[in-house]
Amino acid sequence: RVQETLRSAGFHVVVVLEGLRELSLLHEADRFALLTHAYNSASEIVTTRSIVETGEFLEALRSRCARHDGWSLASLRVLVEVHYTPDEIADCAQALRALGIPGPLADKVRMPLRELVAD
């Protein structure tokens, strides 16, 4: 639904499948279902090998896409908030898990990622 909302507003939607090496850890049927669903969607698919590569891709994309037909990237929240409410603390825990921090320890960090990595 989020992708359709963005497409209906004129945005080009790309889905990032991160961590292709980790896909090999999934059961074959689950891996097949995930890839089939992803590649049959109306969105384009970009694959990355790691969270670092995903970050580099998104940073490059962000630097080139500040505005879209009068929409700023900050205003995207208005479009997607009916489908998704960001939880910065939970997102931080997920990011820490993706970096290899054990779940119980990652859950103890009760701050947004932007605060955790601020200089």
Image (spheres, grey):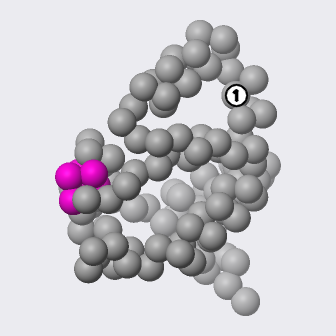
Q: Is residue 59 visible?
A: yes
The answer to if 7 sits in the magenta stretch is yes
Q: Callout 1: helix, strand or loop?
A: helix
Q: Nearer the viewer, residue 23 or 15?
A: 15
Q: In the rendering, at what x and y percent does residue 79 appear?
A: 24, 62
Q: In the rendering, at what x and y percent does residue 114 appear?
A: 59, 77
- Is residue 105 shown left or right of residue 31? right
Q: In the rendering, at what x and y percent does residue 25 appear?
A: 75, 23
The answer to if 113 sits in the magenta stretch is no
Which residue is the site of mark 1?
23
Task: Classify the position of the N terminus by image quarter.
Answer: top left
The residue shown at (69%, 46%) is 48
Task: Classify the position of the C terminus by image quarter.
Answer: bottom right
- Is residue 18 shown left or right of residue 76? right
Q: Nearer the viewer, residue 95 or 90?
A: 95
- What main secondary structure does the magenta stretch of the protein show? helix
Q: Is residue 112 visible?
A: no
**Magenta stretch in the rendered image:** 5-9
Q: In the rendering, at what x and y percent does residue 44 appear?
A: 47, 42
The residue shown at (34%, 73%) is 68
Label 1, residues with CA under 10 Å away: few <14, some 14-19, many ≥20:
some
Q: Nearer the viewer, residue 51 or 60?
A: 60
